[in-house]
Image: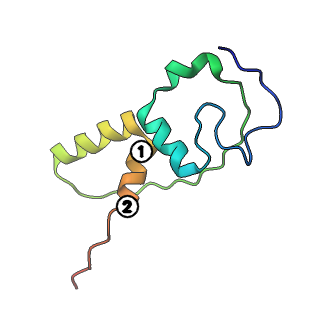
Amino acid sequence: MKRSCDKKGVAGRGSRLSPARTYAKIGVFWGEHDLPDYWDSTCPVQAQVRMKSEESLYAVVKGLSDTIRREAKECGVWLQEKVQKLKPRPQHG
């Protein structure tokens, strides 16, 4: 079923494709569903994104480095979100 695309967006209504009304429930919905299954119901959008990035170098064992690189390439932002949830360890000094 192809939905009509309007310029109103989804503000205040939740998601176009899921019945969820909160960002948390929309996240759960998309954690359980795949976009290709809903592709015909999507509408084109334009967005501007401003991201800050930095490069930091850390010494880690080769196997871990390869794993981090592979996961970052495959999962992108997901990996960043998981790392941000880690609790910082106290520094020894």
Q: What residue is rendered at 43% in x and 40% in y? A: 76
Figure check: 23 above or below 16: below
Rendering quarter of residue 47: top right
Q: Residue 39, percent across and down?
A: 58, 19
Q: What residue is rendered at 74% in x and 33% in y? A: 46
Q: Residue 93, percent across and down?
A: 22, 85
Number of dots carrying numbers: 2
Task: Determine whether the residue tagged by mark 1 lies in a helix, strand or loop.
Answer: helix
Alpha carbon separation for disc pair 2 and 1? 11 Å
Figure check: 44 above or below 22: above
Going by the picture, which residue comes out furthest to the bottom? 93
Task: Determine whether the residue tagged by mark 2 lies in a helix, strand or loop.
Answer: loop
- Which residue in the protein does label 2 denote? 85
Q: Residues within 10 Å of mark 1 (few under 14, many from 20)?
A: few
The mark found on residue 78 in the picture is 1
The amino acid pointed to by label 1 is Trp
The answer to which of marks 2 and 1 sits earlier in the sequence is 1
Q: Residues within 10 Å of mark 2 (few under 14, many from 20)?
A: few
